[in-house]
Image (cartoon, rainbow, N blue to C red):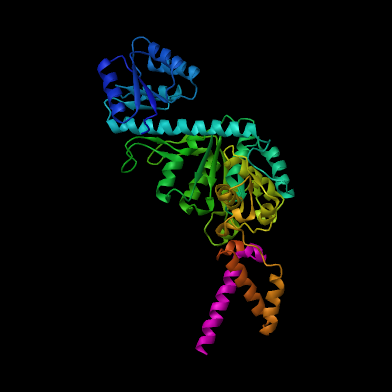
Amino acid sequence: MESSRAVLVVDDDAAMREMLVSLLEEEGIRAEGAEGGAKALDRLRDSEFDAVLSDIRMPDTSGIEMLGEAREIRPDLPVILMTAFGSIDSAVEAMRAGAFDYVTKPFKKNEVLVILERAFERRALEEENRRLRRAVDQTSAMGDLIGASPAMREIFALVRKIADTRSSILITGESGTGKEVLARTIHFSSAGPERPFVPVNCTAIPEGLLESELFGHVRGAFTGAHASKRGLFETANGGTLFLDEIGDMGLGLQSKILRVLQDGEIRPVGGNHTVRVNVRIIAATNKDLRHEMEAGQFRRDLFYRLNVIPIDIPPLRERREDVPLLAEAFLARHTGGRKLALSRAALDKLLRGRFEGNARELENMIERAIALAEGPEIRPEDLPLSGDPREEPEHAGEDLARTALQRRMSLRELEDLYIDEVLQSTGGNKVQAARILGINRRTLYRRGERRAHGRSHGDRE
């Protein structure tokens, strides 16, 4: 727990109040007690807190009443209510009134700490959303999405059309092209940017935990589930859930995502009830999901549910007009007020780049160049060799043809040589190689198998 966090403990029982304040302070949390709802409301008007932990039954102002007034004073403040009676009715009433969660007395120390940690996480997420909204307001109409190429102008126009819709969106593109930036831009360009934007990277969370993260779980659902937990679908309720790299999600979880899209309901892990949610799904992937469907790795029905509005972001090497704009934006982002310009020669060097890592690679190069630059300008030599874009030799095509002629290669052999060169240039990434070659990935695999079979057959002969 972070020592900067502050919790207001509200209970008319002095012993319970002091025990909780002591418990939280032992965990490094700044805690303050209030002996009733009225005094708690006075403290909320005067001071900043990150969460409130309040008893429900109090003589002057009940916890439910205090909750209602607290939400008027600080609408985004998580309030956790405590009840000594274990009453389901009290718990339901608390949640309907807008409580973040509730805990039943007597409770274990860890139960309270786990719920508070989730409350702090939600508070941090809401603050991040506010920061992003401010950033969007301070930039262009398309927020951090930058570009002047025809492809990007088409994307800008499409974003303006779809921002207010609730239809599912599927964003495709290579790694580093800015799929999450686009998803955030769509969300914050909508009619209700105060609504939550919740991103989740489907590859960053182990498959076994991802279901609990998305749908939540009830207490006791599995070992370590000491308290019930809301999932990201509930956190994103009324807003947008961004599923990044959905092409890496397992088939079992895909079917549950499909059910949410169909029914608008989720079922927490271990629970026997469903929860209605109103969430727009924006999904993204760097994979070719049509090929994944053919290989049986992605559900066809889920693909069509997600692909209502498809948006493909071309790689940076196909929209070189965007390189100067992005470079200047990254320069402004990372200089920290230092006056530094990009020299014409350095920009020319960037314009010749391949940028297999797309905008992310360009940003890394600019950030390193800022650290290396000694004068008022970034020069070509400030762009490190290890990060330089791979430049294509001016006569690369002629060299390949000359090699084929000298070796008296057949057309099939020349084709195989070119495929090898393309695979080498993409670091063995068959999806990228297939895109460059203009063939599908299955064809590329079949050719590789054919060549391997031919070599082994030749060896036997």
> Percent position (x, y) of residue 404?
68, 80
Which stretch is magenta?
433-461
Residue sitting at x 59%, y 62%: 431
In the image, residue 368 lies in the stretch drawn in magenta: no
Does residue 210 appear left or right of residue 238 in this picture?
Answer: left
Choose top left, top right, bottom left or bottom right for residue 65.
top left
Residue sitting at x 74%, y 49%: 150
Choose top left, top right, bottom left or bottom right for residue 136.
top right
Does residue 451 appear left or right of residue 120 in this picture?
Answer: right
> Percent position (x, y) of residue 169?
61, 44
> Percent position (x, y) of residue 113?
33, 31
Residue sitting at x 39%, y 25%: 6
In the image, residue 435 lies in the stretch drawn in magenta: yes
Q: Quick one: which residue is furthest to the top in this view? A: 60
Does residue 439 appear left or right of residue 128 in this picture?
Answer: right
Q: Is residue 300 above or below residue 66?
A: below
